[in-house]
Image: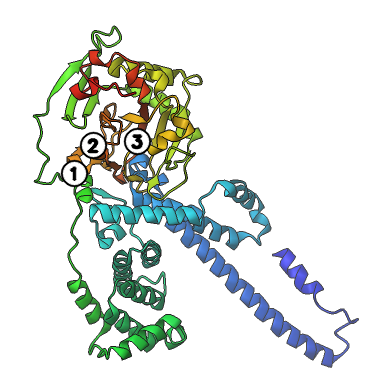
C-alpha cells in the first residue's frame, strides 16, 4: 500500500507551493477527484481480488481430496482426478495472477514458481477430460450422472459446474464425439437454469448448435442459433457458422419452432436414438453376450512346474479360460510384498507409454493411455526373482523374454483393441533376428481395480477382471508362425480405482529352446511347435 501511495505522490508535477494560488488549488481539486477515483478503483480491485481468493480457497477446500476421510478412495474417482488436474492447471495460475502485485506475496509466489515446471498444463486437463469421455462412452454413463460426480457405484462428493460441462463438451467435439458434446451442453443448460452462472449462456448454446449440426441435426442447430440471436444478437450475427446454418435453413425452407426454446430441447432429447452397445462395451462392462463361443469345458488345477522345488510348497492355481488359443489365469503368481517393491522402484521412472510396430521405439497415442517403464534384471533383484518364477512356471527360456514392463493407468486409462504379436513382415526387422516374434504374453495384475480395467478378448468372449497377484497367460501365434487373430484383446478404461500391471512378452525362441513338452501349463498343440 505504501508503494502505491508513493507512486501517486511522485507522479504529481512539482510546481512550487500550491496553497498560494486558489486557481492552483482548484486544479488540485481536480487532481484529487482523479486520485479518489483511482483509489476507489484500486479498492474495488482489491476487494474483488480478495473475494476471488476467498472463493478459490473455499472451492479448493471443498473439492480437494486432501480433507477427505479416505484420501486414496477419494483420489481413485476420475471426477476427483479431473478436478485435481483442473485446479492445479488453472485455479492456482489464477491465484498467482491475483496476488502477483503484492510485496507480501513474494514467498508464496516463489513457492508457486518453484513448483510450476512440474504442475499440470492445459494438455493434462485435455487428457483428463478425454478420459472422462472414454469412461462415459464405454460404460454408458450419462453426462447428468457424471456431472453429479457419480461414476458407477462411486460418488466423487463434488458436482461439476456448467463451465466444466462446457469444457468437456468442447473436448468431445474436438474428438469427433458430437452426440456426447450435445449431451454435456444440455447438462450445462440445466445447471444454468438452476442458478449456475459459471459460464455465459450464449457460449453454451453456440457449442450446442455446433454439436448437433456436426451430428447431422440441422433443425436443432437452426433453433439453437435463433435462440442466441434473440437475446445476444451481437454475439452471433457476425459468426460464419451462424450465417452458414441460416442459409441452409432457408434453402431447406425450415419452419421456425413455435414455442419456448426449452421445448425444442426436450423434443430433441426424446428423439435421440438409443445407443447400441458394441461387443467390446458389453465385455468391458462385465456383461458376457449370450452367444458364448463354444469349446471344451473349462478346468482348473494346481501346478508345481513338474515338482520344481521352488513351487512344491507354493503351487500356482491354473484356470483354463480357452484352449485355442490358449488363455489361462494363474492365481497366487506374485506376492503382495513383491508388488509393493515393484511399485516403489518403478513409480519414479515411469513415462508415457508408446505404441510400437516392432520396427521402432514407437510413438505416443490416444489408443494407449498409461505410463510405463521397463525394468532390467541386472539392475533390480526383484525383476530377476520374477523372471525365475516365470521360467519355473512356464518353462520359457528367460533369455528370450523381453524386459519386464510395469504400467500404471490414469484417468480413464486404457489400451484399445490390439494384438501383441507384430507379424511375419515385422520379423525382417533387426529386433527379430535372434528372438522371433511375440509368441506369448504374460500379464500380471499388481492391484485390484474398483470398477473397470478388465482385460477382454472379444473374439473369445473372455473377460479377465484384474485380480491382485494373479496373471493371465495367452498365446499370440498359430503353429505356422502367423498371428492368431483370436488373440485380439483390449485393456478397458479404468472407471475408478488404481490399475497396475506387468507385461512380459515372450519371444518364439524362448519356447524352441525349452522342454515345453514337459509343461502341463501349455496346450497340447503348442507342445508341437518346432517351426523356429
Task: Assess disc 1: are there few (<14), some (14-19) or many (≥20) residues with their C-alpha within 10 Å of its C-alpha.
Answer: some
Residue depth check, mark 1 versus mark 3: number of the one nearer the observer: 3
User: Is residue 169 toward the left or the right of residue 450 in the image?
Assistant: right
Residue corresponding to mark 2: 465
**Which quadrant of the view contains residue 158?**
bottom left
Q: Are marks 2 and 1 in contact (CB under 8 Å)?
A: yes
N-terminal of the pair, mark 3 or mark 2, is 3
Task: Assess disc 2: are there few (<14), some (14-19) or many (≥20) residues with their C-alpha within 10 Å of its C-alpha.
Answer: some
Instruction: Tell me the quarter of the image containing the C terminus.
Output: top left
Query: 40 and 276: which one is in front?
Result: 276
Identified at 19% across, 38% down, the residue is 462
Residue corresponding to mark 3: 421
User: Is residue 450 toward the left or the right of residue 128 in the image?
Assistant: left
Residue 400 in view? yes
Residue corresponding to mark 1: 286
Query: 14 and 286: which one is in front?
Result: 286
Instruction: List x then y, in percent, for residue 196.
Output: 36, 70
**Which quadrant of the view contains residue 324?**
top left
Q: On screen, 387 above or below 256? A: above
Residue depth check, mark 3 versus mark 2: number of the one nearer the observer: 3
Identified at 29% across, 36% down, the residue is 483
Residue 61 in view? no
Amino acid at each position: 500500500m505504501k508503494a502505491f501511495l508513493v507512486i501517486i505522490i511522485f507522479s504529481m508535477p512539482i510546481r512550487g507551493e500550491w496553497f498560494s494560488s486558489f486557481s492552483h488549488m482548484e486544479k488540485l481539486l481536480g487532481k484529487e477527484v482523479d486520485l479518489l477515483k483511482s483509489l476507489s478503483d484500486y479498492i474495488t480491485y482489491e476487494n474483488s481480488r480478495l473475494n476471488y481468493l476467498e472463493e478459490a480457497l473455499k472451492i479448493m477446500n471443498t473439492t480437494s481430496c486432501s480433507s477427505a476421510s479416505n484420501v486414496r478412495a477419494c483420489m481413485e474417482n476420475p471426477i476427483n482426478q479431473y478436478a485435481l488436474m483442473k485446479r492445479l492447471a488453472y485455479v492456482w495460475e489464477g491465484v498467482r495472477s491475483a496476488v502477483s502485485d503484492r510485496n507480501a506475496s513474494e514467498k508464496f509466489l516463489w513457492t508457486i514458481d518453484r513448483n510450476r515446471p512440474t504442475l499440470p498444463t492445459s494438455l493434462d486437463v485435455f487428457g483428463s477430460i478425454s478420459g472422462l469421455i472414454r469412461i462415459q462412452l464405454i460404460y454408458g454413463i450419462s453426462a447428468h450422472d457424471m456431472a453429479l460426480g457419480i461414476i458407477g457405484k462411486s460418488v466423487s462428493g463434488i458436482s461439476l459446474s456448467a463451465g466444466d460441462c462446457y469444457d468437456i463438451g468442447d473436448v468431445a467435439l474436438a474428438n469427433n464425439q458430437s452426440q456426447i458434446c450435445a449431451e454435456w451442453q444440455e447438462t450445462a443448460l440445466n445447471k444454468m437454469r438452476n442458478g449456475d452462472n459459471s459460464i455465459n449462456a450464449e457460449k453454451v448454446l453456440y457449442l450446442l448448435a455446433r454439436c448437433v449440426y456436426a451430428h447431422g441435426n440441422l433443425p436443432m442447430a437452426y433453433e439453437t442459433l435463433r435462440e442466441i440471436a434473440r437475446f445476444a444478437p451481437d454475439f452471433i450475427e457476425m459468426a460464419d457458422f451462424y450465417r452458414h446454418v441460416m442459409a441452409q435453413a432457408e434453402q431447406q425452407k425450415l419452419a421456425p419452432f413455435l414455442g419456448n426454446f426449452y421445448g425444442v430441447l426436450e423434443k430433441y432429447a426424446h428423439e435421440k436414438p438409443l445407443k447400441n452397445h458394441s461387443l467390446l462395451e458389453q465385455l468391458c462392462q462385465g456383461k458376457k453376450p449370450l452367444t458364448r463361443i463354444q469349446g471344451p469345458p473349462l478346468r482348473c488345477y494346481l501346478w508345481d512346474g513338474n515338482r520344481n522345488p521352488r513351487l512344491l510348497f507354493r503351487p500356482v492355481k491354473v484356470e483354463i479360460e480357452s484352449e485355442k488359443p490358449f488363455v489361462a489365469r494363474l492365481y497366487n503368481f506374485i506376492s503382495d510384498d513383491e508388488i509393493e517393491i515393484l511399485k516403489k522402484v518403478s513409480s519414479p521412472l515411469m513415462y508415457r507409454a508408446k505404441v510400437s510396430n516392432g520396427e521402432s521405439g514407437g510413438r505416443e497415442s490416444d489408443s494407449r493411455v498409461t505410463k510405463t517403464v521397463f525394468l532390467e534384471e541386472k539392475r533390480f533383484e526383484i525383476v530377476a526373482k520374477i523372471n525365475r518364477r516365470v521360467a519355473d512356471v512356464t518353462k520359457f527360456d528367460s533369455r528370450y523374454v523381453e524386459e519386464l514392463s510395469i504400467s500404471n493407468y490414469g484417468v480413464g486409462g486404457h489400451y484399445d483393441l490390439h494384438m501383441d504379436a507384430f507379424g511375419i513382415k515385422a520379423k525382417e526387422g533387426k529386433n527379430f533376428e535372434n528372438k522371433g516374434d511375440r509368441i506369448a504374453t504374460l500379464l500380471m495384475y499388481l492391484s485390484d481395480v474398483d470398477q473397470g480395467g478388465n482385460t477382454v478378448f472379444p473374439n473369445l468372449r473372455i473377460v479377465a477382471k484384474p485380480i491382485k497377484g494373479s496373471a493371465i497367460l495367452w498365446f499370440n501365434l498359430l503353429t505356422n508362425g502367423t498371428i492368431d487373430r483370436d488373440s485380439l484383446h483390449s485393456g478397458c478404461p479404468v472407471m475408478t480405482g488404481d490399475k497396475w500391471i506387468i507385461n512380459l512378452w515372450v519371444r518364439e525362441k524362448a519356447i524352441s529352446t525349452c522342454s515345453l513338452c514337459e509343461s502341463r501349463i501349455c496346450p497340447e498343440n503348442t507342445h508341437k511347435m518346432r517351426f523356429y
